[in-house]
Amino acid sequence: MLEFYDRLERCYLCEKPWFYKYSLDAWYPQFKSFVDSGLCSTIPEGRSGFQKVVPPDQFYPCLKEALELVDKEKAKQLRWSDETEDRKIIGFKTKIHAHRVPDAS
């Protein structure tokens, strides 16, 4: 997922940019920044230099803390399983502001 967002933001293999720079609105890069900044109480030192993802056993506790700090619209980007306890993410929404293509058919 990180590689996908990185390539999307850099417009990897694009003939020309098709979206507005800095318009990507995605939950995971922001969550990763939250953890890297040491704001998660279970990982106060942030991720180590070689870790690319949040450790699995700390993912949901950190996500819960991060979601308490964001507005309700941002939290709605995530879809959750139906369980009442130990809910898991089953889907998510990502937005990007694309340039208008006047001659598209």
Image: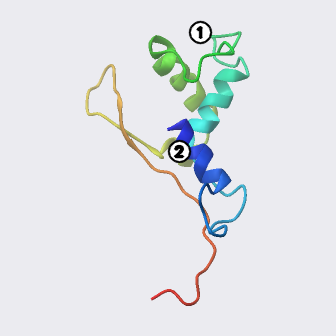
Q: How is the image coloured?
A: rainbow
> Is the residue 101 above or below the residue 99 in the image?
below
Q: Earlier in the sequence, mark 1 or mark 2?
A: 2
Q: Residues within 10 Å of mark 2 (few under 14, many from 20)?
A: few
Lateral position of residue 95 relative to residue 19, left or right:
left
Q: Residue at x 46, y 21 (%)?
A: 60
Amino acid, disc 2: Phe
Say whether residue 25 is visible: no
Q: Could you tell me which secondary element the residue under label 1 belongs to? A: loop
Which quadrant of the figure contains the C terminus?
bottom left
Residue at image mark 1:
42
Q: Residue at x 59, y 58 (%)?
A: 13
Name the one closer to the observer, 60 or 10.
Answer: 10
Amino acid, disc 1: Thr
Q: Position of residue 63 (x, y in %)?
A: 52, 25
Say whether residue 71 is visible: yes
Q: Splitting the image into 4 quarters, where does residue 12 fall? A: bottom right
Q: Residue at x 67, y 58 (%)?
A: 23
Residue at image mark 2:
4
Q: Splitting the image into 4 quarters, where does residue 20 fall? A: bottom right
> Is the residue 3 above or below the residue 33 in the image?
below
